[in-house]
Amino acid sequence: MKPMSNPATTRANSLDPVQLSDWRWQWFLDEAVAALQPLGPEPYPIHPQFLARDGVTGSKAKPVPVATATWACQTKKFRQARAACVSAGDAASVLNFVINPRTRYDLPFFGADLVTLPNGHLLALDLQPVDRGDRLHTEAVWDLLLPIFERWKQSLPDGGPIPAEAQPYFSPGFLWTRIPLGSEGDRLIDAVIRPAFQEYLQLYLRLEASATPVSMERSELLLAGQKRYTRYRSEKDPARGMLSRFYGSDWTEAYIHDVLFDLETQPAASKPIE
């Protein structure tokens, strides 16, 4: 096994590059970071302990190095765009990339969850609604998203049912699949997931470019929807168990609540960039 790099010695702020050894999802992060550059991203405030961390998993006889890093930025219309990156050899390879829009703009969330575990790849892409029941918020987005979704979903196995409690937080264009490890999975990632990721992200950035400020009353409604979403995600984060095994529950809970889903715990980060 190649040694893990130690990202803690090379990352001083949230915009510093992430390069993890033996990490499956490097191309996707690089693609997202490059796509955000025209927006003039600025560092997002993240405590140094969460910018990067190394650990060990597995048994004492066969320890597996673990590296975790967080890339994040803010822009005029995005309160937080962040990537949680985990590389743990054959045990796990994860990219969770989420864009949280500022509530002065009527935009959905962008979400990409790319996970490799010993039993396969779990892959999800979506433009997630702040309020699924608000047609003003969803209709125009879904009209553009659904043709992209329909084109790519036919090439992928279905990921299975979504729990009822989670359904309000996903759009009809939720691209969700489980694919095997090995050559067939590699082919599907290269031929389907890569271009689908690009199309979902480019659509989102087109929506960002055309978004104009909304009224304060509308902004408050969007903020309430965002808080419902982040509260649900922080309570149900599927990475909680994995991260707790790697780094302990105290660090994990702080990471989930103060970095990944920090809308209520770090309101100062919502101030717009002039």
Image (cartoon, rainbow, N blue to C red):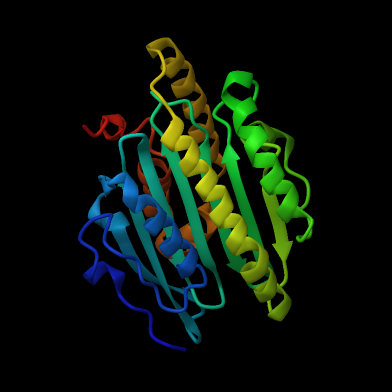
Quadrant assignment, res 232: top right
Q: Nearer the viewer, residue 217 or 120?
A: 217
Lateral position of residue 71 relative to residue 148, left or right: left
Q: Position of residue 1 (x, y in %)?
A: 47, 89
Q: Quadrant of residue 119?
A: bottom right
Quadrant the C terminus occupies: top left
Tally of marks: 0
Q: Position of residue 259 (x, y in %)?
A: 36, 45
Q: Residue shown at 50%/54% (left/top)?
A: 96
Q: Is residue 43 left or right of residue 177?
A: left
Q: Nearer the viewer, residue 64 or 111?
A: 111
Residue 260 lies, in percent from the top left, at 42, 46
Report the side of 27 relative to 168 (left or right): left
Q: Classify 84 as above or below 79.
A: below
Q: Residue at 44% x, 56% y: name it.
A: 32
Residue 159 appears anywhere in the view: no
